[in-house]
Image: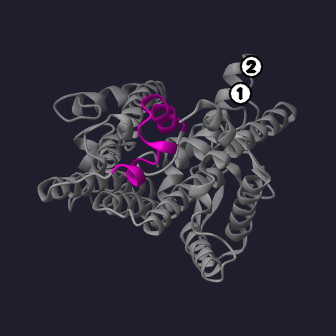
């Protein structure tokens, strides 16, 4: 691919702006008016707690339905996202940057003393910009942190469906594409089924909303997590260098033949990863709701009434990370092993989770002190049982 063509394709168009604005506007309106379970968040330091309306699945299904009807009536092309992937990538990046400008300015001007909106300013511009100033900034009663991660997960699914439509349109639908779509789309739908579990994760309860989260949710999740099937900056650059796969459409342009044994093994990797990931997160969520609830049919082992040391959390201190890594690997395995490009996501996630695990450990050691030391003694493995 010619570098000039690549740069030209990255220039935002008004069409890409319209697509992004309509998507975000739809999401803002739908999650505000659609019915859903009202779930309390964690209790913050000042004793307050936010409440979240978990109706993401309904909003997603309605959106997909509307797009399906629009496609049947020739009002919207099912391949509009795959056709404008690079434009949408750059448009979303610019939107993320401008959003952070507003958040940073609003945070600096805030005089709130509450935990959600109290500004945390270190004086280091890069640090404050990257990690954010406020814990739970809102816009028109919408919690932006929760909103952005919803947008990222929905965007990932929409990219996948658009790529699937293009593969059907081009007559290039393959077993590998079907496996990739099956694993990723089940994972995304499962996220929205268990959306309330997100409320007890590190991102929601501890991270302030900075450029790291805004960019991660709106750009990184949808465009990088779909690297196996769709356009991403990394795939594009690699394709330009290798001059092998135009536009970086990996599974659209490279036919991968998997043996039956490889396909079955891929399914097992996904299944095991899902059971560990979802099981660990579910156990933690249930424990936070009811510390006496049974784990695997037995009363839980709890340290000083605060830390769960049963179930998956009695095997490794961050067992959910292991499940996440296996899931990421299952998304890439349908692409075969001829190139490392489709494995960017699991490789990146491995590095990210190791970094996050270190931050988790430091935060928990400071928060729980002797209790955490006892937990580490009982559960010596961090992520990989008997390895690390």
Which residue does the image show at 60% across and 58% down from the upper left? 81
**Neighbourhood count class around disc 1 (C-alpha, 10 Å): few under 14, some 14–19, many 20 upward:** some
- Residue 306 lies left or right of residue 98; in this view the side is left
**Neighbourhood count class around disc 2 (C-alpha, 10 Å): few under 14, some 14–19, many 20 upward:** few
Measured from the top left, where is residue 93 in percent x and y?
A: 68, 40
> Which residue position holds label 2?
125
Residue 129, labelled with which disc?
1
The residues bearing labels 2 and 1 have C-alpha atoms spaced at a distance of 6 Å
Measured from the top left, where is residue 55 in percent x and y?
A: 59, 69
Measured from the top left, where is residue 289 in percent x and y?
A: 45, 58
For the residue pair 74 and 211, the one nearer the viewer reads as 74
Residue 194, labelled with which disc?
none
| Proximity of marks 2 and 1: CB atoms separated by less than 8 Å | yes
- Residue 31 lies left or right of residue 156; in this view the side is right
Describe the element under mark 2 as helix, strand or loop: helix
Q: Is residue 139 above or below residue 76?
A: above
Measured from the top left, where is residue 146 in percent x and y?
A: 62, 53
Q: Is residue 216 above or below residue 53?
A: above
**Majority secondary structure in the magenta region:** helix
Q: Is residue 190 visible?
A: yes
For the residue pair 374 and 182, the one nearer the viewer reads as 182
- Residue 64 lies in what quarter of the image? bottom right
Residue 307 falls inside the magenta stretch? no
Report the magenta residues as a range: 233-254
Which residue does the image show at 75% across and 57% down from the upper left? 15
Q: Is residue 237 above or below residue 144?
A: above
């Amino acid at each position: 691919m010619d570098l000039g063509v690549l740069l030209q394709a990255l220039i935002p168009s008004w069409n890409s702006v319209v697509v992004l604005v309509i998507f975000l506007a739809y999401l803002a309106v739908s999650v505000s008016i659609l019915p859903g379970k009202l779930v309390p968040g964690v209790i913050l330091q000042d004793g307050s707690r936010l409440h979240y309306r978990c109706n993401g699945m309904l909003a997603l299904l309605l959106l997909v339905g509307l797009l399906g009807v629009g496609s049947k009536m020739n009002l919207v092309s099912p391949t509009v996202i795959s056709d404008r992937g690079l434009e949408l990538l750059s448009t979303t990046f610019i939107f993320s940057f401008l959003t952070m400008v507003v958040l940073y300015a609003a945070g600096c001007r805030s005089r709130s003393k509450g935990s959600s909106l109290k500004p945390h300013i270190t004086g280091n511009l890069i640090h404050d910009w990257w990690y954010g100033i406020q814990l739970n900034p809102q816009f028109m009663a919408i919690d932006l942190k929760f909103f952005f991660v919803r947008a990222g997960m929905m965007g990932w699914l929409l990219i996948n469906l658009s790529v699937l439509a293009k593969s059907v349109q081009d007559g290039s639908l393959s077993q590998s594409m079907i496996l990739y779509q099956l694993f990723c789309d089940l994972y995304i739908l499962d996220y929205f089924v268990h959306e309330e579990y997100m409320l007890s994760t590190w991102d929601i309860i501890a991270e302030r909303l900075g450029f790291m989260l805004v960019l991660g949710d709106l750009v990184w999740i949808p465009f990088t997590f779909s690297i196996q099937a769709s356009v991403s900056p990394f795939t594009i650059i690699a394709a330009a260098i290798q001059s092998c796969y135009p536009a970086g459409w990996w599974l659209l342009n490279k036919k991968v033949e998997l043996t039956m044994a490889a396909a079955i093994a891929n399914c097992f990797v996904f299944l095991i990863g899902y059971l560990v990931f979802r099981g660990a997160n579910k156990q933690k969520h249930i424990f936070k709701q009811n510390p006496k609830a049974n784990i695997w049919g037995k009363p839980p082992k709890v340290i000083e009434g605060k830390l769960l040391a049963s179930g998956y959390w009695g095997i490794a201190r961050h067992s959910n990370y292991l499940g996440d890594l296996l899931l990421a690997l299952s998304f890439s395995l349908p692409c075969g092993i001829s190139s490392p490009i489709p494995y960017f996501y699991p490789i990146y996630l491995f590095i990210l989770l190791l970094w996050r695990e270190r931050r988790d450990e430091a935060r928990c050691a400071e928060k729980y002190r002797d209790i955490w030391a006892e937990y580490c003694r009982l559960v010596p493995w961090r992520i990989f049982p008997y390895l690390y």
